[in-house]
Amino acid sequence: MSDQPKSMDEIMALCKRRGFIFQASEIYGGIQGFWDYGPLGAQLKKNLRDAWWDDVVMTGCRGQAGPDGQPIRIVPVDSCIIQNPKVWEASGHLAGFADPMRKCPGCGHFVRADHLWDLLAESSVWFNDLIQVFDPHTGGIDSPRLLQWAKSKGKRLAPNLALVRQPEVTLSWLATRVQGQPGVPPDMKELTRYIATEQLHETGLQEPCPRCGAPLGEPAPFKLMFESYAGLTQDEDNKVYLRPETAQGIFINYKNVLDSTRVKVPFGIAQTGKAFRNEVTPRNFTFRSREFEQMEIEFFCHPDESRKWYEFWRDWRMNWWESLGLAGVNLQLREHDADELAHYAKTGAGTSDIEYRFPFTAPGFGELEGVADRTDFDLRQHMEHSGAKLEYFDQERNERYLPHVIEPSAGLDRGVLAAICEAFTPDPDRPSKVYMKFHPRLSPIKAAVFPLVKKDGMPEVGEKLRAELVRRFGRLGSIDFDEKQSIGKRYARMDEAGCPFCFTIDGDTMQDQTVTVRHRDTLAQDRIALDAVLAYLGEKLGL
Protein backbone atom coordinates (compact mmCIF):
# COMPACT_ATOMS: atom_id res chain seq x y z
CA MET A 1 0.00 0.00 0.00
CA SER A 2 1.28 3.45 -0.93
CA ASP A 3 2.65 5.86 1.66
CA GLN A 4 1.78 8.81 -0.55
CA PRO A 5 -0.62 11.39 0.92
CA LYS A 6 -4.23 10.74 0.06
CA SER A 7 -5.69 12.89 -2.69
CA MET A 8 -8.45 15.21 -1.54
CA ASP A 9 -9.66 15.48 -5.13
CA GLU A 10 -10.08 11.70 -5.30
CA ILE A 11 -11.86 11.65 -1.93
CA MET A 12 -14.27 14.38 -3.04
CA ALA A 13 -14.90 12.58 -6.33
CA LEU A 14 -15.79 9.37 -4.49
CA CYS A 15 -18.07 11.30 -2.12
CA LYS A 16 -19.99 12.65 -5.11
CA ARG A 17 -19.99 9.38 -7.08
CA ARG A 18 -21.19 7.17 -4.24
CA GLY A 19 -23.58 9.60 -2.58
CA PHE A 20 -21.75 10.63 0.56
CA ILE A 21 -21.66 14.41 0.07
CA PHE A 22 -23.07 16.71 -2.63
CA GLN A 23 -22.63 20.42 -3.18
CA ALA A 24 -25.75 22.23 -1.95
CA SER A 25 -27.95 23.64 -4.73
CA GLU A 26 -25.67 22.01 -7.26
CA ILE A 27 -28.13 22.21 -10.18
CA TYR A 28 -28.13 25.99 -9.73
CA GLY A 29 -24.36 26.28 -9.58
CA GLY A 30 -24.07 25.59 -5.86
CA ILE A 31 -23.61 27.98 -2.96
CA GLN A 32 -20.25 28.43 -1.29
CA GLY A 33 -19.87 27.03 2.21
CA PHE A 34 -22.92 24.73 2.18
CA TRP A 35 -23.03 20.97 1.60
CA ASP A 36 -25.72 18.30 1.43
CA TYR A 37 -25.34 14.70 2.54
CA GLY A 38 -26.46 11.95 0.19
CA PRO A 39 -27.87 8.55 1.22
CA LEU A 40 -24.56 7.07 2.40
CA GLY A 41 -23.35 10.33 3.92
CA ALA A 42 -26.57 10.94 5.82
CA GLN A 43 -26.39 7.46 7.35
CA LEU A 44 -22.69 7.85 8.15
CA LYS A 45 -23.40 11.16 9.86
CA LYS A 46 -26.28 9.61 11.81
CA ASN A 47 -24.08 6.71 12.89
CA LEU A 48 -21.41 9.08 14.23
CA ARG A 49 -24.01 11.25 15.97
CA ASP A 50 -25.68 8.15 17.46
CA ALA A 51 -22.34 6.79 18.67
CA TRP A 52 -21.69 10.07 20.47
CA TRP A 53 -25.22 10.19 21.88
CA ASP A 54 -25.18 6.59 23.08
CA ASP A 55 -21.70 6.78 24.60
CA VAL A 56 -22.05 10.22 26.20
CA VAL A 57 -25.70 10.67 27.11
CA MET A 58 -27.34 7.26 27.31
CA THR A 59 -24.52 5.37 29.02
CA GLY A 60 -22.65 8.20 30.77
CA CYS A 61 -19.26 7.71 29.13
CA ARG A 62 -19.98 4.01 28.54
CA GLY A 63 -20.55 3.47 32.23
CA GLN A 64 -17.08 4.68 33.20
CA ALA A 65 -16.71 6.28 36.61
CA GLY A 66 -15.52 9.86 36.84
CA PRO A 67 -12.45 11.07 38.75
CA ASP A 68 -14.63 11.20 41.90
CA GLY A 69 -15.36 7.49 41.56
CA GLN A 70 -19.05 8.08 40.88
CA PRO A 71 -21.13 7.36 37.76
CA ILE A 72 -21.20 10.20 35.25
CA ARG A 73 -24.60 11.80 34.73
CA ILE A 74 -25.35 13.53 31.43
CA VAL A 75 -28.80 14.83 30.46
CA PRO A 76 -29.86 16.09 27.03
CA VAL A 77 -31.48 19.30 25.80
CA ASP A 78 -32.50 20.50 22.36
CA SER A 79 -32.52 24.28 22.22
CA CYS A 80 -33.73 26.61 19.45
CA ILE A 81 -31.46 27.90 16.72
CA ILE A 82 -32.89 31.39 17.24
CA GLN A 83 -32.85 32.83 20.76
CA ASN A 84 -33.46 36.24 22.30
CA PRO A 85 -30.67 38.51 20.94
CA LYS A 86 -29.75 39.35 24.54
CA VAL A 87 -28.30 35.84 24.78
CA TRP A 88 -25.61 36.80 22.26
CA GLU A 89 -25.04 40.12 23.93
CA ALA A 90 -24.37 38.41 27.25
CA SER A 91 -22.15 35.73 25.70
CA GLY A 92 -20.00 38.36 24.01
CA HIS A 93 -20.79 37.26 20.47
CA LEU A 94 -22.43 40.51 19.41
CA ALA A 95 -19.49 42.61 20.54
CA GLY A 96 -16.59 40.35 19.78
CA PHE A 97 -17.66 37.67 17.30
CA ALA A 98 -16.11 39.25 14.24
CA ASP A 99 -13.06 38.50 12.14
CA PRO A 100 -10.72 41.18 10.79
CA MET A 101 -11.46 41.37 7.06
CA ARG A 102 -9.66 43.07 4.20
CA LYS A 103 -11.50 44.09 1.04
CA CYS A 104 -9.87 44.01 -2.36
CA PRO A 105 -10.43 47.30 -4.23
CA GLY A 106 -9.84 45.52 -7.52
CA CYS A 107 -12.30 42.61 -7.53
CA GLY A 108 -14.27 43.25 -4.33
CA HIS A 109 -13.13 39.96 -2.78
CA PHE A 110 -12.99 39.84 1.04
CA VAL A 111 -10.03 38.15 2.70
CA ARG A 112 -9.81 37.22 6.36
CA ALA A 113 -6.70 39.04 7.55
CA ASP A 114 -5.22 36.16 9.53
CA HIS A 115 -5.77 33.70 6.66
CA LEU A 116 -4.14 35.73 3.88
CA TRP A 117 -0.90 33.80 3.58
CA ASP A 118 -2.63 30.44 3.87
CA LEU A 119 -5.01 31.44 1.09
CA LEU A 120 -2.17 32.58 -1.14
CA ALA A 121 -0.36 29.29 -0.68
CA GLU A 122 -3.44 27.06 -0.87
CA SER A 123 -5.68 28.56 -3.52
CA SER A 124 -4.14 31.55 -5.30
CA VAL A 125 -3.53 30.56 -8.92
CA TRP A 126 -1.31 33.51 -9.76
CA PHE A 127 0.76 33.18 -6.58
CA ASN A 128 1.49 29.49 -7.09
CA ASP A 129 2.42 30.15 -10.69
CA LEU A 130 4.63 33.11 -9.85
CA ILE A 131 6.64 31.42 -7.10
CA GLN A 132 8.10 29.14 -9.75
CA VAL A 133 9.92 32.18 -11.16
CA PHE A 134 12.12 32.91 -8.18
CA ASP A 135 13.84 30.96 -5.41
CA PRO A 136 12.56 32.01 -1.97
CA HIS A 137 15.20 29.93 -0.20
CA THR A 138 18.24 31.70 -1.62
CA GLY A 139 16.61 35.02 -2.35
CA GLY A 140 17.77 34.70 -5.93
CA ILE A 141 15.72 37.03 -8.12
CA ASP A 142 15.63 36.67 -11.87
CA SER A 143 14.33 40.08 -12.93
CA PRO A 144 14.07 39.22 -16.66
CA ARG A 145 11.90 36.19 -15.83
CA LEU A 146 9.73 38.23 -13.47
CA LEU A 147 9.32 40.85 -16.17
CA GLN A 148 8.44 38.20 -18.75
CA TRP A 149 5.87 36.67 -16.37
CA ALA A 150 4.33 40.10 -15.69
CA LYS A 151 3.87 40.79 -19.40
CA SER A 152 2.52 37.35 -20.26
CA LYS A 153 0.84 35.11 -17.68
CA GLY A 154 0.53 37.89 -15.14
CA LYS A 155 -1.87 39.90 -17.31
CA ARG A 156 -4.28 36.99 -17.30
CA LEU A 157 -3.78 35.60 -13.80
CA ALA A 158 -3.23 38.76 -11.70
CA PRO A 159 -4.22 41.85 -13.71
CA ASN A 160 -4.22 44.12 -10.64
CA LEU A 161 -0.85 43.07 -9.22
CA ALA A 162 1.66 45.94 -9.01
CA LEU A 163 4.25 43.81 -10.81
CA VAL A 164 1.84 43.51 -13.75
CA ARG A 165 0.60 47.10 -13.75
CA GLN A 166 4.01 48.79 -13.26
CA PRO A 167 6.66 46.08 -13.68
CA GLU A 168 9.69 48.34 -14.06
CA VAL A 169 8.83 50.46 -11.01
CA THR A 170 8.05 47.43 -8.86
CA LEU A 171 11.24 45.64 -9.83
CA SER A 172 13.25 48.76 -9.03
CA TRP A 173 11.90 48.73 -5.45
CA LEU A 174 12.81 45.07 -5.19
CA ALA A 175 16.30 45.66 -6.57
CA THR A 176 16.87 48.49 -4.09
CA ARG A 177 15.91 46.17 -1.25
CA VAL A 178 18.28 43.40 -2.40
CA GLN A 179 21.18 45.80 -2.91
CA GLY A 180 20.52 47.59 0.36
CA GLN A 181 20.81 44.42 2.45
CA PRO A 182 23.40 42.24 0.76
CA GLY A 183 23.65 38.78 2.20
CA VAL A 184 20.16 39.01 3.74
CA PRO A 185 17.80 37.69 1.07
CA PRO A 186 14.10 38.57 1.39
CA ASP A 187 11.84 35.72 2.38
CA MET A 188 8.71 34.72 0.50
CA LYS A 189 6.41 37.12 2.33
CA GLU A 190 8.71 40.09 1.82
CA LEU A 191 9.15 39.29 -1.87
CA THR A 192 5.40 39.06 -2.27
CA ARG A 193 4.90 42.43 -0.58
CA TYR A 194 7.41 44.07 -2.88
CA ILE A 195 5.78 42.79 -6.07
CA ALA A 196 2.41 43.98 -4.69
CA THR A 197 3.61 47.58 -4.12
CA GLU A 198 3.57 50.36 -6.71
CA GLN A 199 4.12 53.52 -4.64
CA LEU A 200 6.45 52.36 -1.90
CA HIS A 201 7.15 55.78 -0.36
CA GLU A 202 3.45 56.71 -0.17
CA THR A 203 1.93 53.43 0.95
CA GLY A 204 4.72 51.33 2.39
CA LEU A 205 4.82 47.64 1.52
CA GLN A 206 1.39 46.28 0.61
CA GLU A 207 -0.16 42.83 0.48
CA PRO A 208 -1.97 41.37 -2.53
CA CYS A 209 -5.43 39.94 -3.13
CA PRO A 210 -5.19 36.16 -3.66
CA ARG A 211 -7.54 36.47 -6.66
CA CYS A 212 -6.44 39.49 -8.69
CA GLY A 213 -3.30 40.79 -6.98
CA ALA A 214 -4.61 44.27 -6.10
CA PRO A 215 -3.31 45.77 -2.82
CA LEU A 216 -5.72 44.88 -0.02
CA GLY A 217 -7.37 47.48 2.18
CA GLU A 218 -6.87 47.81 5.91
CA PRO A 219 -8.44 45.17 8.19
CA ALA A 220 -11.95 45.93 9.44
CA PRO A 221 -14.33 43.85 11.62
CA PHE A 222 -16.72 41.54 9.80
CA LYS A 223 -19.75 40.03 11.58
CA LEU A 224 -19.76 36.27 11.58
CA MET A 225 -23.37 35.81 12.71
CA PHE A 226 -26.20 35.43 10.22
CA GLU A 227 -28.98 37.96 10.81
CA SER A 228 -32.71 37.55 10.29
CA TYR A 229 -35.97 39.02 11.59
CA ALA A 230 -38.72 37.61 13.80
CA GLY A 231 -42.05 39.31 13.28
CA LEU A 232 -43.84 41.36 10.64
CA THR A 233 -41.53 44.36 10.73
CA GLN A 234 -37.99 43.92 9.51
CA ASP A 235 -36.29 46.51 11.68
CA GLU A 236 -33.70 46.64 14.45
CA ASP A 237 -36.28 45.85 17.13
CA ASN A 238 -37.06 42.52 15.46
CA LYS A 239 -33.55 41.51 14.48
CA VAL A 240 -32.49 38.00 15.51
CA TYR A 241 -29.46 35.85 14.85
CA LEU A 242 -28.82 32.26 13.82
CA ARG A 243 -26.79 30.74 16.62
CA PRO A 244 -23.03 30.55 16.01
CA GLU A 245 -22.69 27.73 18.56
CA THR A 246 -24.98 25.38 20.46
CA ALA A 247 -23.34 25.98 23.85
CA GLN A 248 -25.33 29.04 24.84
CA GLY A 249 -28.59 27.12 24.48
CA ILE A 250 -27.28 24.85 27.21
CA PHE A 251 -26.19 27.65 29.54
CA ILE A 252 -29.50 29.51 29.39
CA ASN A 253 -31.33 26.26 30.25
CA TYR A 254 -28.99 25.31 33.08
CA LYS A 255 -31.38 26.49 35.81
CA ASN A 256 -34.39 24.88 34.10
CA VAL A 257 -32.56 21.56 34.04
CA LEU A 258 -31.67 21.84 37.73
CA ASP A 259 -35.24 22.74 38.68
CA SER A 260 -36.88 20.02 36.58
CA THR A 261 -34.58 17.04 37.26
CA ARG A 262 -32.81 15.44 40.17
CA VAL A 263 -29.29 16.06 38.84
CA LYS A 264 -26.61 17.32 41.20
CA VAL A 265 -23.24 18.87 40.51
CA PRO A 266 -21.11 17.38 39.00
CA PHE A 267 -23.27 16.68 35.96
CA GLY A 268 -23.35 17.48 32.26
CA ILE A 269 -25.84 18.75 29.71
CA ALA A 270 -25.41 17.55 26.12
CA GLN A 271 -26.77 18.78 22.83
CA THR A 272 -26.30 18.19 19.13
CA GLY A 273 -27.50 20.60 16.49
CA LYS A 274 -26.87 23.04 13.67
CA ALA A 275 -24.85 26.21 14.06
CA PHE A 276 -24.10 28.93 11.53
CA ARG A 277 -21.11 31.17 10.92
CA ASN A 278 -20.80 33.55 8.01
CA GLU A 279 -17.31 32.40 7.10
CA VAL A 280 -15.82 34.71 4.52
CA THR A 281 -13.53 32.06 3.10
CA PRO A 282 -15.22 28.67 3.53
CA ARG A 283 -12.86 26.05 2.15
CA ASN A 284 -11.45 22.55 2.35
CA PHE A 285 -14.68 20.74 1.49
CA THR A 286 -16.87 20.43 4.61
CA PHE A 287 -14.08 21.35 7.04
CA ARG A 288 -14.89 25.06 7.12
CA SER A 289 -18.57 25.59 6.23
CA ARG A 290 -21.16 28.23 6.92
CA GLU A 291 -23.70 25.69 8.20
CA PHE A 292 -22.42 22.88 10.37
CA GLU A 293 -23.44 20.58 13.19
CA GLN A 294 -21.92 20.37 16.65
CA MET A 295 -21.89 17.77 19.41
CA GLU A 296 -21.34 19.61 22.69
CA ILE A 297 -21.20 18.83 26.38
CA GLU A 298 -21.19 21.43 29.13
CA PHE A 299 -20.08 19.66 32.30
CA PHE A 300 -20.75 21.56 35.54
CA CYS A 301 -18.46 20.95 38.49
CA HIS A 302 -17.15 22.53 41.66
CA PRO A 303 -14.45 25.16 40.94
CA ASP A 304 -11.90 23.25 43.01
CA GLU A 305 -12.46 20.12 40.92
CA SER A 306 -12.34 21.68 37.45
CA ARG A 307 -8.79 20.60 36.70
CA LYS A 308 -9.35 16.91 37.30
CA TRP A 309 -12.61 16.98 35.31
CA TYR A 310 -10.87 18.78 32.48
CA GLU A 311 -8.19 16.09 32.38
CA PHE A 312 -10.83 13.37 32.50
CA TRP A 313 -12.80 14.77 29.57
CA ARG A 314 -9.68 15.57 27.55
CA ASP A 315 -8.42 12.00 27.79
CA TRP A 316 -11.81 10.33 27.45
CA ARG A 317 -12.71 12.25 24.31
CA MET A 318 -9.34 11.41 22.73
CA ASN A 319 -9.89 7.74 23.50
CA TRP A 320 -13.40 7.92 22.05
CA TRP A 321 -12.19 9.11 18.65
CA GLU A 322 -9.50 6.42 18.70
CA SER A 323 -12.14 3.77 19.39
CA LEU A 324 -13.91 4.71 16.14
CA GLY A 325 -10.92 4.03 13.94
CA LEU A 326 -9.01 7.31 14.03
CA ALA A 327 -6.18 5.89 16.12
CA GLY A 328 -2.67 6.33 14.78
CA VAL A 329 -0.39 9.02 13.42
CA ASN A 330 -3.26 11.06 11.96
CA LEU A 331 -4.74 11.86 15.38
CA GLN A 332 -3.13 13.96 18.08
CA LEU A 333 -3.99 15.73 21.33
CA ARG A 334 -2.52 19.21 21.60
CA GLU A 335 -2.59 21.45 24.67
CA HIS A 336 -3.01 25.16 23.93
CA ASP A 337 -0.24 27.61 24.60
CA ALA A 338 -1.00 30.58 26.87
CA ASP A 339 -1.40 32.94 23.90
CA GLU A 340 -4.10 30.71 22.38
CA LEU A 341 -6.50 30.77 25.32
CA ALA A 342 -10.06 31.90 24.56
CA HIS A 343 -11.64 34.94 26.19
CA TYR A 344 -13.46 32.78 28.73
CA ALA A 345 -10.36 30.89 29.88
CA LYS A 346 -8.21 32.16 32.72
CA THR A 347 -4.47 31.61 32.91
CA GLY A 348 -3.83 28.03 34.02
CA ALA A 349 -7.21 26.77 32.84
CA GLY A 350 -6.95 23.70 30.64
CA THR A 351 -7.63 23.97 26.92
CA SER A 352 -6.70 21.41 24.32
CA ASP A 353 -7.60 20.37 20.80
CA ILE A 354 -8.06 16.89 19.41
CA GLU A 355 -6.68 17.26 15.92
CA TYR A 356 -6.72 15.14 12.76
CA ARG A 357 -4.25 15.26 9.89
CA PHE A 358 -6.50 15.88 6.90
CA PRO A 359 -5.04 15.62 3.38
CA PHE A 360 -5.44 19.39 3.00
CA THR A 361 -3.64 20.14 6.29
CA ALA A 362 -0.82 17.60 5.95
CA PRO A 363 1.76 17.52 7.29
CA GLY A 364 -0.10 19.66 9.83
CA PHE A 365 -3.39 19.00 11.62
CA GLY A 366 -6.88 20.49 11.75
CA GLU A 367 -9.13 20.78 14.79
CA LEU A 368 -11.65 18.00 15.29
CA GLU A 369 -12.77 18.75 18.83
CA GLY A 370 -11.89 21.27 21.51
CA VAL A 371 -11.91 20.52 25.24
CA ALA A 372 -11.86 23.64 27.40
CA ASP A 373 -12.27 24.77 30.98
CA ARG A 374 -14.68 27.69 30.47
CA THR A 375 -14.51 28.50 34.21
CA ASP A 376 -17.75 30.22 35.34
CA PHE A 377 -17.60 32.80 32.54
CA ASP A 378 -20.84 31.92 30.75
CA LEU A 379 -23.02 31.39 33.80
CA ARG A 380 -21.71 34.61 35.34
CA GLN A 381 -22.37 36.58 32.15
CA HIS A 382 -25.93 35.31 31.87
CA MET A 383 -26.58 35.86 35.57
CA GLU A 384 -25.41 39.47 35.32
CA HIS A 385 -27.27 40.27 32.11
CA SER A 386 -30.55 38.47 32.87
CA GLY A 387 -30.79 39.00 36.63
CA ALA A 388 -31.55 35.29 37.10
CA LYS A 389 -29.97 33.58 40.11
CA LEU A 390 -27.79 30.83 38.68
CA GLU A 391 -25.71 29.91 41.70
CA TYR A 392 -25.86 26.29 42.79
CA PHE A 393 -26.51 25.33 46.40
CA ASP A 394 -24.54 22.26 47.31
CA GLN A 395 -26.26 20.58 50.24
CA GLU A 396 -23.38 18.20 50.93
CA ARG A 397 -20.87 21.04 51.14
CA ASN A 398 -23.41 23.52 52.55
CA GLU A 399 -22.04 25.96 50.00
CA ARG A 400 -23.42 28.21 47.28
CA TYR A 401 -21.29 28.77 44.18
CA LEU A 402 -21.29 29.21 40.42
CA PRO A 403 -20.07 25.93 38.92
CA HIS A 404 -17.14 25.86 36.59
CA VAL A 405 -17.77 24.29 33.20
CA ILE A 406 -15.71 21.83 31.18
CA GLU A 407 -16.72 21.88 27.52
CA PRO A 408 -15.89 19.06 25.09
CA SER A 409 -17.13 20.54 21.78
CA ALA A 410 -16.88 18.36 18.68
CA GLY A 411 -17.66 19.15 15.07
CA LEU A 412 -19.95 16.46 13.69
CA ASP A 413 -19.30 17.40 10.07
CA ARG A 414 -15.56 17.47 10.70
CA GLY A 415 -15.85 14.09 12.38
CA VAL A 416 -17.60 12.68 9.33
CA LEU A 417 -14.93 14.17 7.08
CA ALA A 418 -12.16 12.71 9.23
CA ALA A 419 -13.86 9.29 9.13
CA ILE A 420 -14.10 9.50 5.33
CA CYS A 421 -10.48 10.60 4.91
CA GLU A 422 -9.22 7.90 7.29
CA ALA A 423 -11.33 5.19 5.64
CA PHE A 424 -10.28 6.10 2.08
CA THR A 425 -7.81 3.34 1.21
CA PRO A 426 -6.35 3.13 -2.31
CA ASP A 427 -5.77 -0.44 -3.49
CA PRO A 428 -4.77 -0.80 -7.15
CA ASP A 429 -5.26 -4.57 -6.99
CA ARG A 430 -9.01 -4.27 -6.44
CA PRO A 431 -11.48 -3.70 -9.26
CA SER A 432 -12.70 -0.58 -7.42
CA LYS A 433 -9.09 0.66 -6.94
CA VAL A 434 -10.14 1.93 -3.52
CA TYR A 435 -12.14 0.79 -0.52
CA MET A 436 -13.60 2.66 2.45
CA LYS A 437 -12.26 1.10 5.63
CA PHE A 438 -14.90 2.43 8.02
CA HIS A 439 -15.10 1.17 11.57
CA PRO A 440 -18.08 -1.24 11.48
CA ARG A 441 -19.93 0.95 13.95
CA LEU A 442 -19.82 3.85 11.48
CA SER A 443 -20.32 1.98 8.21
CA PRO A 444 -23.48 3.30 6.53
CA ILE A 445 -24.12 -0.15 5.01
CA LYS A 446 -23.69 -2.85 7.62
CA ALA A 447 -23.97 -5.85 5.33
CA ALA A 448 -24.93 -6.84 1.80
CA VAL A 449 -26.73 -9.95 0.59
CA PHE A 450 -25.94 -11.22 -2.93
CA PRO A 451 -27.69 -14.08 -4.70
CA LEU A 452 -24.98 -15.40 -7.03
CA VAL A 453 -27.48 -15.74 -9.88
CA LYS A 454 -31.04 -14.62 -10.34
CA LYS A 455 -32.55 -18.13 -10.43
CA ASP A 456 -32.68 -21.53 -8.74
CA GLY A 457 -34.33 -20.09 -5.63
CA MET A 458 -31.29 -18.01 -4.66
CA PRO A 459 -33.06 -14.60 -4.78
CA GLU A 460 -35.79 -15.89 -2.50
CA VAL A 461 -33.28 -17.18 0.07
CA GLY A 462 -31.41 -13.89 -0.18
CA GLU A 463 -34.54 -11.78 0.32
CA LYS A 464 -35.46 -13.77 3.41
CA LEU A 465 -31.97 -13.34 4.86
CA ARG A 466 -32.00 -9.63 4.09
CA ALA A 467 -35.37 -9.22 5.86
CA GLU A 468 -34.01 -10.95 8.95
CA LEU A 469 -30.91 -8.74 8.96
CA VAL A 470 -33.04 -5.60 8.54
CA ARG A 471 -35.18 -6.52 11.52
CA ARG A 472 -32.09 -7.06 13.67
CA PHE A 473 -29.66 -4.42 12.40
CA GLY A 474 -31.62 -2.00 10.24
CA ARG A 475 -31.61 0.74 12.88
CA LEU A 476 -27.80 0.80 12.68
CA GLY A 477 -27.48 1.16 8.92
CA SER A 478 -28.83 -0.23 5.70
CA ILE A 479 -28.68 -3.85 4.57
CA ASP A 480 -28.06 -3.95 0.85
CA PHE A 481 -29.55 -6.50 -1.53
CA ASP A 482 -28.17 -6.75 -5.06
CA GLU A 483 -28.76 -9.44 -7.68
CA LYS A 484 -27.50 -7.58 -10.77
CA GLN A 485 -24.18 -7.79 -12.65
CA SER A 486 -21.21 -9.97 -11.78
CA ILE A 487 -20.35 -10.72 -8.18
CA GLY A 488 -17.04 -8.89 -8.65
CA LYS A 489 -18.77 -5.66 -9.64
CA ARG A 490 -21.12 -5.98 -6.69
CA TYR A 491 -18.18 -6.42 -4.33
CA ALA A 492 -16.53 -3.36 -5.89
CA ARG A 493 -19.59 -1.20 -5.23
CA MET A 494 -19.70 -2.31 -1.62
CA ASP A 495 -15.97 -1.63 -1.22
CA GLU A 496 -16.51 1.98 -2.29
CA ALA A 497 -19.48 2.27 0.07
CA GLY A 498 -17.50 0.84 2.98
CA CYS A 499 -19.69 -2.21 3.62
CA PRO A 500 -17.68 -4.51 5.93
CA PHE A 501 -19.39 -7.85 5.15
CA CYS A 502 -21.03 -9.36 2.06
CA PHE A 503 -23.02 -12.60 2.26
CA THR A 504 -23.35 -14.55 -0.98
CA ILE A 505 -26.07 -17.11 -1.67
CA ASP A 506 -24.82 -19.71 -4.17
CA GLY A 507 -25.51 -23.23 -5.38
CA ASP A 508 -24.06 -24.80 -2.25
CA THR A 509 -26.46 -22.77 -0.11
CA MET A 510 -29.36 -24.66 -1.64
CA GLN A 511 -27.66 -27.97 -0.74
CA ASP A 512 -26.05 -27.47 2.68
CA GLN A 513 -27.61 -24.20 3.97
CA THR A 514 -24.27 -22.33 4.13
CA VAL A 515 -23.26 -18.95 2.71
CA THR A 516 -20.01 -17.25 1.82
CA VAL A 517 -19.06 -14.20 3.88
CA ARG A 518 -16.55 -11.88 2.24
CA HIS A 519 -14.50 -9.50 4.44
CA ARG A 520 -13.96 -6.00 3.05
CA ASP A 521 -10.56 -5.31 4.62
CA THR A 522 -8.77 -8.63 4.06
CA LEU A 523 -10.76 -9.97 1.08
CA ALA A 524 -10.90 -13.29 2.98
CA GLN A 525 -13.93 -15.49 2.36
CA ASP A 526 -15.38 -17.85 4.95
CA ARG A 527 -18.17 -20.36 4.80
CA ILE A 528 -20.72 -20.16 7.62
CA ALA A 529 -24.14 -21.62 8.27
CA LEU A 530 -27.09 -19.64 6.91
CA ASP A 531 -28.83 -19.68 10.27
CA ALA A 532 -25.66 -18.37 11.96
CA VAL A 533 -25.45 -15.16 9.91
CA LEU A 534 -27.36 -12.98 12.41
CA ALA A 535 -25.20 -14.06 15.35
CA TYR A 536 -22.05 -13.73 13.24
CA LEU A 537 -22.84 -10.17 12.15
CA GLY A 538 -23.93 -9.19 15.64
CA GLU A 539 -20.59 -10.34 17.05
CA LYS A 540 -18.64 -8.45 14.35
CA LEU A 541 -20.62 -5.28 15.04
CA GLY A 542 -19.99 -5.59 18.77
CA LEU A 543 -23.62 -6.22 19.68
Image (spheres, grey):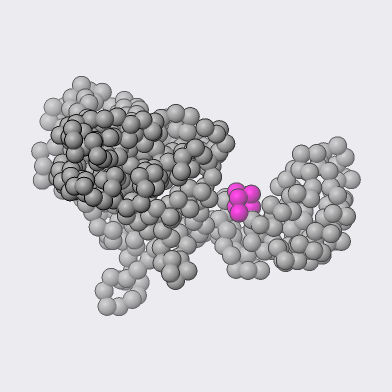
Q: Quadrant of the C terminus?
A: top left
Of 426 and 98, the residue lying toward us: 426
Residue range highlighted in magenta: 118-123
Measured along the vertical axis of the image, is residue 470 above or below residue 515? below
Would residue 227 be found to the left or right of residue 380 on screen? Answer: right
Visible residue check, residue 537: yes
Which quadrant holds residue 228?
Answer: bottom left
In percent of width and height, residue 512 lies at 18, 32
In this image, 260 relative to 482: left or right? left
Whether 147 is drawn above or below 489: the answer is: below
Q: Name which residue lies at 21% across and 37% down.
A: 509
* Residue ranking furthest to the bottom: 233
Q: Nearer the viewer, residue 147 or 29?
A: 29
- On the image, the x and y values in percent for residue 448 come to 28, 44
The image position of residue 215, as x and y in percent, is 69, 61
The structure residue drawn at horizontal position 38% and vertical position 66%, both measured from the top left corner, is 227
